[in-house]
Image (spheres, rainbow, N blue to C red):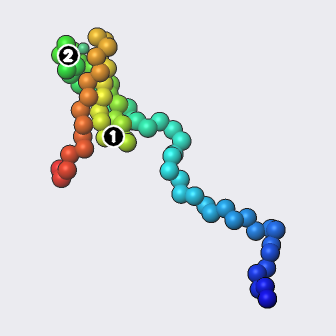
Amino acid sequence: MNNYKTSSNYKGNNPRPQKDKPGPKFSNYEGKFICHKCKSDVPKARYWKDTMDLTWMCDCKYISKVNLNAKGY
Ligand SMILES: [Zn+2]
């Protein structure tokens, strides 16, 4: 006995949750950031959402990095 109804119209694809949103994984920040190497002012930084890092690159090509993944406050 077979109670299963076969329907060729049914698509068995489950809607998958969106993991990767299109677009950049960082947002730009403007402000005043100090190069960790040569102590110059850098007007722009990038905040990386995945790693919660804030990075900025100076004219001297040094990339300064600060992690904002601090617990609490
Ligand atoms: Zn620098």
Disc nearer the start of the sequence (1/2): 2
Q: Where residue 72 appears, x then y in whole percent?
A: 18, 53
**Label 1 to label 2: alpha-carbon separation:** 22 Å
Q: Is residue 50 above or below residue 10?
A: above
* Residue 37 numbered mark, or none: 2
Residue type for callout 2: Lys
Relative image position of residue 67 (x, y in whole percent): 24, 37
Extreme-top residue of the structure:
60
From the image, tell me which residue sits under label 1: 51
Is the C-beta of the residue carrying label 2 under 8 Å from the nearest atom of ligand 1?
yes
* Residue at the bottom extreme, as displayed: 1
| Residue at the image position 44 percent from the left and 38 percent from the top | 25
The image quadrant that residue 29 belongs to is top left
Instruction: Report which quarter residue 63 is drawn in.
Output: top left
Q: Residue at x 53, y 53 (%)?
A: 18
User: Residue at the spot x=23%, y=32% of the render?
Assistant: 66
- Please state the total of marks drawn on the protein image: 2
Q: From the viewer's perspective, is residue 9 above or below residue 66?
A: below
Q: Secondary structure at mark 2?
A: loop
Amino acid, disc 1 = Thr
Task: Judge by depth and name the residue closer to the eye, 45 or 37.
Answer: 37
Q: Position of residue 50 (x, y in %)?
A: 37, 42
Secondary structure state at the residue bearing disc 1: loop
Q: Tell me, yes or no, if residue 43 can be seen here.
A: no
